[in-house]
Image (cartoon, rainbow, N blue to C red):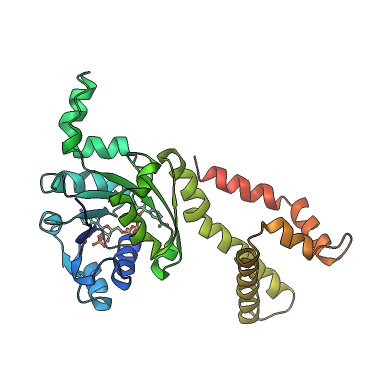
């Protein structure tokens, strides 16, 4: 396998649909080389309404025929039956597997794709035919993938050094068109999900609280929403343009005893930073 041209996405939900549309919008994979599957035609109609060039099927076996890259984007409890369906149709030496399914490890994916090897390994034979192995990747985007602004964590079964090999570079290019990409060891994927996938909800939670607080200060909901979005955008732009950490920008607006100082103190007295860290830790368990 040298070039990833044809891509099949199994699952046309929030993630699979957004990834398929993100690829179609980008320049690495042509829309006519993308195939998407779902259980119900209605989900596929939603994709075709935006990108009629995308091929759609409700039959996974047909859909993976000839695919260079298969992206599995179903719920964790649905993946086993999907793999059982498609594993006889993949082509070792050609097909690359990428799973966006959170919490399903390479070890589990391997035992789904190679049940015989898994049984033999359990029996202690240790037989592994490297040539028959499918390159496997785990990919954790967040919901901003739908607008090309995801922060996506990627791990390769063969380790993070594979980011620079022929397949890794192509996977990277596909997802980099949909936002930022960080290559990590598999054992950091859950932490990545907490920080960036769950993290998008945590950032929004801060914004929701600020909007509520703004309404309490006398603004209309629309005024508060506009002010909070603008302020967060400004904070993000400052960090990006200065390449700085938040503490430096906080210092610039904080005079001892001043308004911001009092506000930050009240937030910390009420456990702000500790609450955020507790939330991250809770979603990583
Ligand atoms: N949401 C996040 O921020 C996030 C982040 C990282 C990873 N993930 C992972 O992304 C995965 C998908 O999540 P989601 O939110 O996109 O779920 P979702 O909206 O429920 O989508 C699941 C999709 O899978 C399809 N499907 C189910 N069984 C199928 C089968 N046998 N063959 C073909 N398609 C099948 C469903 O088809 P129908 O539409 O016809 O029912 C649906 O389109 C999850 O495993 C999750 O862990 C999510």
> Is 70 on the left or on the right of 155, as rendered?
left
Q: Position of residue 56 (x, y in %)?
A: 17, 67
Check the image and name the residue furthest to the right: 257
Q: Position of residue 271 (x, y in %)?
A: 71, 50
Q: Residue at x 28, y 77 (%)?
A: 50
> Is 86 on the left or on the right of 111, as rendered?
left
Instruction: Judge by depth and name the residue closer to the eye, 12 or 237.
Output: 237
> Is 1 on the left or on the right of 141, as rendered?
left
Residue 122 occupies which quadrant of the picture? top left
Residue 159 occupies which quadrant of the picture? top left
Instruction: Judge by depth and name the residue closer to the eye, 219 or 226.
Output: 226
Vertical placement of 127 versus 234: above or below? above
Q: Residue at x 23, y 54 (%)?
A: 70
Q: Position of residue 97 (x, y in %)?
A: 25, 48
Q: How many marks?
A: 0
- Ligand 1 quarter of the rendering: bottom left
Q: Position of residue 93 (x, y in %)?
A: 16, 45
> Is 119 on the left or on the right of 231, as rendered?
left
Check the image and name the residue furthest to the top: 124
Q: Residue at x 22, y 38 (%)?
A: 112
Vertical placement of 209 versus 136: above or below? below
């Amino acid at each position: 396998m040298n070039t990833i041209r044809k891509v099949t996405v199994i699952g046309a939900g929030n993630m699979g649909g957004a990834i398929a549309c993100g690829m179609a919008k980008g320049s690495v994979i042509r829309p006519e080389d993308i195939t998407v599957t779902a259980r119900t035609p209605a989900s596929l109609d939603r994709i075709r309404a935006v990108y009629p060039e995308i091929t759609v099927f409700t039959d996974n076996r047909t859909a993976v025929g000839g695919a260079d890259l298969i992206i599995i984007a179903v719920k964790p409890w649905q993946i086993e039956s999907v793999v059982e369906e498609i594993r006889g149709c993949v082509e070792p030496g050609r097909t690359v597997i990428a799973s966006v399914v959170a919490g399903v490890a390479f070890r589990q994916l391997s035992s789904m794709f190679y049940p015989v090897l898994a049984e033999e390994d359990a029996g202690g034979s240790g037989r592994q035919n490297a040539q028959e192995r499918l390159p496997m990747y785990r990919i954790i985007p967040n919901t901003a993938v739908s607008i090309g602004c995801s922060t996506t964590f990627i791990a390769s079964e063969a380790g993070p050094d594979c980011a620079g090999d022929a397949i890794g570079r192509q996977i990277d290019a596909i997802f980099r068109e949909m936002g930022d990409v960080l290559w990590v060891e598999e054992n950091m994927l859950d932490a990545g999900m907490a920080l960036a996938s769950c993290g998008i909800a945590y950032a929004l939670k801060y914004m929701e609280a600020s909007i509520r607080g703004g309404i309490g200060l006398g603004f209309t909901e629309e005024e508060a929403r506009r002010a909070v979005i603008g302020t967060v955008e400004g904070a993000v732009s400052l960090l990006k343009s200065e390449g700085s950490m938040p503490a430096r920008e906080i210092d610039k607006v904080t005079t001892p005893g001043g308004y911001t100082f009092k506000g930050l103190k009240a937030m910390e007295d009420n456990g702000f930073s500790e609450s955020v860290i507790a939330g991250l830790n809770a979603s990583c368990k």
